[in-house]
Amino acid sequence: MKVTDFLARLERVKPAGANQWTALCPGHDDQHPSLSITEADGKILLKCFAGCDLVDILKPLRLEQKDLFFDGHQGKGMGGILTLVKPVNVSTPPQIVFRNS
Ligand SMILES: [Zn+2]
């Protein structure tokens, strides 16, 4: 699946930088976009700042982890490339800071 196909399934998608977007997280009752989507190296990386597990994010979309690989990138020995970073303290979501350095 391409990142554009994935973004089409999400709500309130906004660009957040080069190959980055934010959107409402389908894994929890999201009031403001908590989900960070990054396109990198032929795959889609997801991070929910509220701390959702990857499976919780994908289940409402009826997707599986393999769907986060772009077409043609499956089965090429890129196992273990999905990253989902949880904030240390979910009550204080980390701030996203963009620098121009
Ligand atoms: Zn979430």
Image (cartoon, grey):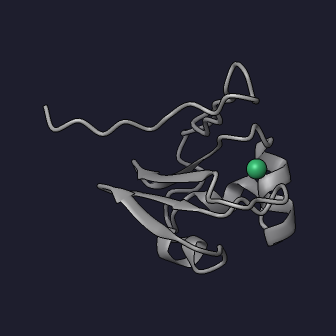
The image quarter in which residue 91 lies: top right
The image quarter in which residue 96 lies: top left
Please identify the quadrant where the N terminus is shown. Answer: bottom right
Left/right placement of residue 46 relative to residue 73 reads right
Q: Residue at x 85, y 67 (%)?
A: 60
How far from the left and from the top, in percent, is residue 18?
Answer: 29, 55
Q: Residue at x 39, y 48 (%)?
A: 41
Left/right placement of residue 25 relative to residue 27 reads left
Q: Residue at x 56, y 78 (%)?
A: 5
Q: Residue at x 84, y 60 (%)?
A: 29
Left/right placement of residue 48 relative to residue 54 reads left
Left/right placement of residue 3 relative to residue 41 reads right
In this rendering, the count of numbered labels is 0
How far from the left and from the top, in percent, is residue 57?
Answer: 78, 55
How far from the left and from the top, in percent, is residue 3?
Answer: 49, 68
How far from the left and from the top, in percent, is residue 30?
Answer: 76, 59
The answer to whether 47 is drawn above or below residue 83 in the figure is below
